[in-house]
Image: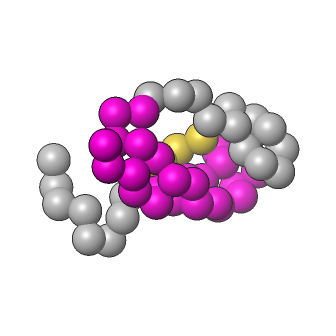
């Protein structure tokens, strides 16, 4: 199993944070600042296009 460090942004308060994500993980995330679940995963610079 591969774990990668992904960047996330909270759509509610704009807080950006990083979290380790397992390759096949699909759990719901919450903002560490405001606890909103409106989280968007940011594209990594080196990530190839899908
Ligand atoms: Zn937030």
Q: Quadrant of residue 28?
A: top right
Q: Quadrant of residue 1?
A: top left
Residue lying farthest to the top in this orientation: 27
Residue 35 percent across, percent down from the top left? 80, 38
Q: Give the residue at x 51% y 59%.
A: 7
Q: Give the residue at x 46% y 60%.
A: 5
Q: Give the residue at x 57% y 54%.
A: 19
Residue 24 percent across, percent down from the top left? 34, 33
The answer to whether residue 16 is magenta is yes
Of residues 10 and 5, which is closer to you in this image?
5
Q: Give the residue at x 69% y 37%.
A: 30
The answer to whether residue 13 is magenta is yes
Residue lying farthest to the front in this orientation: 1
Residue lying farthest to the right in this orientation: 34
Position of 8 compared to 16: left or right?
left
Residue 27 percent across, percent down from the top left? 53, 28
Q: Which residues are magenta?
A: 1-25
Position of 32 compared to 47: left or right?
right
Residue 45 higher or lower than 16, as above or below: below
Dominant secondary structure of the residues highlighted in magenta in the image:
strand
Residue 25 higher or lower than 6, as above or below: above
Position of 6 compared to 39: left or right?
left
The answer to whether residue 42 shows anywhere in this view is: no
Of residues 41 and 3, which is closer to you in this image?
3
- Count of numbered circles in the view: 0
Residue lying farthest to the bottom in this orientation: 45
The answer to whether residue 43 shows anywhere in this view is: yes
Residue 31 higher or lower than 27, as above or below: below
Position of 45 compared to 26: left or right?
left
């Amino acid at each position: 199993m591969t774990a990668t460090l992904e960047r996330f942004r909270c759509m509610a308060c704009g807080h950006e944070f990083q979290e380790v994500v397992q390759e096949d993980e699909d759990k719901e995330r919450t903002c560490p600042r405001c606890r909103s679940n409106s989280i968007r995963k940011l594209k990594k610079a080196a990530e190839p296009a899908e």
